[in-house]
Amino acid sequence: MTANQEASPARQSSLNLWPIGNCQVSGLIDDAAGLVWGCIPRVDGDPVFCSLLNGDRQDQGVWRIELEGQVSATPRYERNTPILITRLEAEDGSAVDVVDMCPRFERVGRMYRPVAFLRIVRPVAGSPRIRVTLSPMCGYGSEQVKTTNGTNHIRYLVGDQALRLSTDAPVGYVLEQRWYRVESDQHFFLGPDEPFSGNVRSETRRMEANTRKYWQLWVRGLATPLDWQNEVIRCAITLKLCQHEETGAIVAALTTSIPEAPHSERNWDYRYCWIRDSYYTVQALNRLGALDVLEKYLAYLRNIVDNARGGQIQPLYSVMGEDALVESVAPDLAGYRGMGPVRMGNAAYRQVQYDCYGQIVMPTVQGFFDKRLLRMADGRDFESLEEVGEAAWAKHDKPDAGLWEFRTRQEVHTYSAVMCWAACDRLANAARHLGREDRADFWEQRAAAIRAKIDSEAWVEDGEGGHYGASFESDYLDASLLQMVELRYLEPGDPRFKSTFEQVEKALRRGEHMLRYATEDDFGAPETAFNICTFWLIEALARCGRGDEARGLFDIMLGHTTPSGLLSEDMDFETGELWGNFPQTYSLVGVINCASLLSKSWNTIR
């Protein structure tokens, strides 16, 4: 290794990450301008940038731009966009800005969202010297890729489809990872293996401007709450990045196998579309008026229902609707901070989770009422949706793995039963709206029967006012019981909800945080709090008249977000350190929902 190629200082992976994306591909940039996670040709593909999960091999599976003598790195998003600008500063006063994005804008009547990462380096002070380390891998970290190159490009042979770097930077310096002086803007377009059309400098600048315009116009259409606007906007942009626009699927997170707790082996692949998580995502974005995400997702759901042909609906599918998500381990990736295993696929696809029926019906029913939609639902959609309702009726009192996806036990989970009730209840609403009174009465009767079953089987008399249990068979509590108000099963003032909330808070609250449940599961007792459950706690506090406490706890949770304003799935309830896959849609939904609930009205300032 030459002096020009000396190793970078040792780095440790962290979740201080900044997502970029275009609804086709996405990447995670660390706080020093390193692209440390990115999959092609879509979110569930091969992670060609995988240093986030590559243990001590932080110089492999990364695209890093470094400044010689660097003493600081300061990332920030360009306002109301996922365009990231990182200011790198050196001890001699020299500085550059590194701009990161995935192009997204309308071109010739369709959305341009290539499998591509665009980076621009702009000198801003002094005589900066940089080094570009571009070392993608393939086969889930099994090998570094070979290259070929021309005068102005480098081809990275990452598999069946090579990636081509088109650049106006010196190609030899990039290949040999040499330091060189930057005296003008440098442009890097890593994308499809085809000749770059046009001048690299002018075309990438046009892409930058058009991408900026697209996102700022999208944000302008959001109906944000008055308070916490910056936080809500950042979460909304990131949730949109989690949608695979080609099909409308929404992934639970952009990563796989970030442990839920240190050395717990609770490492799961979240790069798939869970019916449940997606329901919560579109519900939150609906509150902001982001109907484009809903419309595309409803198209995805229609295909899922069609393909099921009246059979079992799985809890999750690939973004392309694939149902077999066979779980395996990537042996060549050591894992986040060396904490493996790194999993591909998710065995939860084989589980039965009956809450999915309600989570299909509820967003779909909006299509019968919302006149803003380009495609409103019709009678044929209702008949198709009734098949989902029939499944909810058949399964409402049958054991399943539940929303927490227990791998070794099944019970009749109260949350699943309530979701089956919601499926029937909302079908009755749709039927009445369509003038089908007989079907409305039919579904109302079924909803009433499921309610009677839940109240009979899940209610526990405990001598302290009673409470609903997490399942028909057991007396333990879980945080999903707090959703009974959100789902309109109970009113906030109902004594049954108040007493259930009191018991849940007593059993599961840990200071500022909330556990999913406190009982042991397949991996032992939970070691971290589940962030969405803390947001459910905040909602329950607000609805039960404890608004000041809810606002205080919400501000504390916002204080735990990463510098990018985002959250992962889990948090150590003693140290506040984030764990679990990132960025996690559940957690971002919690921010949006709580801000919408707690914010002052716009009428207070108009």
Image (tube, rainbow, N blue to C red):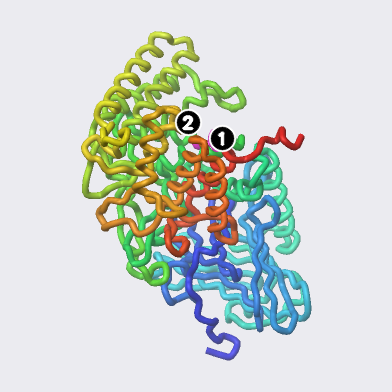
Residue 404 seen in this snapshot: yes
Q: Amino acid at mark 2?
A: Pro
Judged left or right of residue 110, residue 254 is left
- Quarter occupied by residue 188: bottom right
- Checking the image for residue 548, the label placed there is none
Which type of secondary structure does the marked residue at label 2 adopt?
helix
Instruction: State the image coordinates of residue 18 (x, y, percent, origin top left).
Output: 57, 60
Q: Tell me where residue 532 appears, x and y as whole percent.
A: 45, 47
For the residue pair 599 and 51, the one nearer the viewer reads as: 599
Q: Position of residue 179 (x, y in %)?
A: 65, 83
- The residue sitting at 37% across, 66% down in the picture is 262
The residue carrying pointer 2 sits among few (fewer than 14), some (14 to 19) or many (20 or more) residues within 10 Å by Cα, namely many
User: Marks 1 and 2: in contact by CB < 8 Å?
Assistant: yes
The verdict on residue 117 being magenta is: no
All told, the count of numbered labels is 2
What secondary structure is the magenta-colored segment mainly? Answer: helix
Residue 306 appears in the picture as rendered: no
The tag on residue 363 is 2
Q: Is residue 575 above or below residue 237?
A: below
**Residue at horizontal 43 percent and vertical 67 percent from the top:** 53
Residue at x 56%, y 49% (from the top left corner): 552
| Left or right of 512 on screen, residue 241 | right
- Magenta part of the chain: 292-297
User: Residue 295 magenta-drawn?
Assistant: yes
Amino acid under label 1?
Asn
* Mark 1, residue position: 286
